[in-house]
Amino acid sequence: EEDRALLATDGLDAADDGEQPGRPVVAIIGRPNVGKSTLVNRVLGRREAVVEDIPGVTRDRVAYDAEWSGRNFTLVDTGGWEVDASGIHLRVAEQAEVAIELADAVLFVVDAKVGATDTDEAVVRLLRRSGRPVVLVANKVDDQKTELEAAALWSLGLGQPWPVSALHGRGTGDALDALLEVLPEKSAVAAYERGGPRRVALVGRPNVGKSSLLNKLAGEDRVVVDNVAGTTRDPVDELIELGGKPWRFVDTAGIRRRVHLTRGADFYASLRTQAAIEKAEVAVVLIDAEENIAEADIRVVQQVIDAGRALVLAFNKWDLLDEERRHYLEREIERDLSQVSWAPRANISAMTGRHVDRLVPGLEVALDSWDQRVPTGRLNSFLGEVVAAHPHPVRGGKQPRILFATQASTRPPRFVVFASGFIEAGYRRFLERRLREEFGFEGTPIEVSVRVRE
Ligand code: GDP
Ligand code: GDP
């Protein structure tokens, strides 16, 4: 019982050890030319966002670190991609949908002089469905006269329209105050902070060699023991220098403290694994190469994929393998781990140190892929070719068309494909495979979701 209680609090520590929560994300959405960029510049207090007088100029999404009244948030300007390089028409509602999905709150900008258009109404429907908090900005209210026009936007049903002149600054403060009121403290969409040493989790079922590997890695080269939440004897994270730079190995207390588990061991081990994965950007899944690949190994791999973290596979205890086992292992890998054939792999021995140095290039490749962004134009010209060569099969006399795709996020790369009808799972996997063939993504899970447009 005692072990259990001890471990239970361990798990909680790991998940809540004073980590900086991700700063909340605010998306600015609205039709082209309503003044989004002007408003961004106003918020940032410096002329940094590109402001163009040409409607619908192609710009990629840009994110800024913003601050208002002492609170920090990330401001995402969705710009105005109207027509991308391959000529597929992107409706504003579609780009708005992606932006909304990735935001904690939305600044919805409407041109008060023009009033609510059909496109604005369509965006309102998306906003309603998303459940995200919204601040309605009635822009271009340069003077008192125009305030009446702003009031007309009550009809959108989003509550109070805030009359603003992004150009002159009139009313922007009040609108931003309203934003802060609905903005959550912690981001639900940005799970971790950027910058600093990259965060690595060493995971795997018991006895695969996690603590041996940690000792090996830290042994010769340890620079700092970082005890953010633990004691010096019992560090939570350790900074270890490998390949000339520091890496943060997260949640190492659980690896170092060799608690002998009794009841509930599996449950707590899996909780700990989950916590470590979530705190990390990349996970090294250790597998005991001498034993058959077990259900439990596959489960840990799946946890990493489900958490959307980069992945490196390390087959440990290589010193114990004979020819026959090596041969058989390759077969097992093909059979049991085919869904992660994209993961870099190292055959190591934590005991002798064999090929332990090969983990670093694996980590670097995986993180690069995890961070990779495919420009919208390139993505769509590639997709255009793929779809032209292999169109979706006709079903019931209908053939869904792929309209447009965008990479909605990185870390891991997530793609949203807009289509005119239902896309079969098989075809989605085909697209996923082609994306990997074209753009690599070695070491990272990727996600392709489909939105159907009538
Ligand atoms: P975006 O494409 O939605 O980002 O819009 P921009 O920020 O590029 O603005 C489009 C045009 O509207 C530019 O010519 C701006 O100078 C103008 N504009 C933006 N905000 C205001 C405003 O508050 N009042 C007036 N009169 N013009 C504005
Ligand atoms: P953990 O439970 O995943 O932290 O695993 P440990 O690091 O405690 O290792 C479990 C057992 O495997 C220990 O007896 C280690 O000495 C042994 N071990 C770990 N790595 C290797 C290796 O590369 N080769 C061999 N022969 N034994 C290893």
Image (cartoon, rainbow, N blue to C red):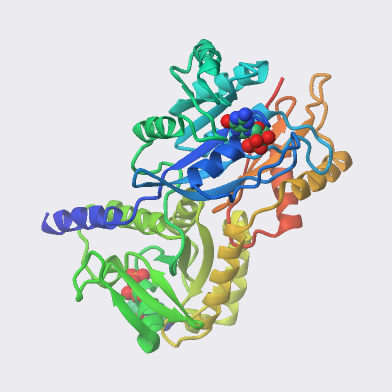
User: Image check: 194 left or right of 56?
Assistant: left
Please tell me in which quadrant of the rendered image residue 92 appears: top right
Quadrant of the rendered image holding ligand 2:
bottom left
The N terminus: image quadrant: bottom left
35 shown above or below 378: above
Please tell me in which quadrant of the rendered image residue 278 appears: bottom left
The location of residue 352, given as percent across then percent down, is: 44, 88
Residue 175 at least partly seen: yes
Q: Which residue is painted at 87% across and 39% down in the image?
A: 388
The location of residue 336, given as percent across then percent down, is: 57, 57
Please tell me in which quadrant of the rendered image residue 332 appears: bottom right
Q: Which residue is painted at 66% across and 20% down in the image?
A: 119
The C terminus: image quadrant: top right
321 shown above or below 178: below
User: Which residue is at the far right?
Assistant: 389
The location of residue 266, given as percent across then percent down, is: 30, 54
User: Image check: 378 left or right of 161?
Assistant: right
Q: Nearer the viewer, residue 68 or 102?
A: 68
The location of residue 40, given as percent across then percent down, is: 55, 41
Q: Which of 231 and 71 is in front in this view?
A: 71
301 shown above or below 239: above
Q: Which residue is painted at 44% across and 37% down in the image?
A: 104
Number of numbered markers = 0
272 shown above or below 168: below
Q: Which of 57 and 298 is in front in this view?
A: 57
Q: Which residue is painted at 28% across and 57% down in the image?
A: 14
Residue 325 at least partly seen: no
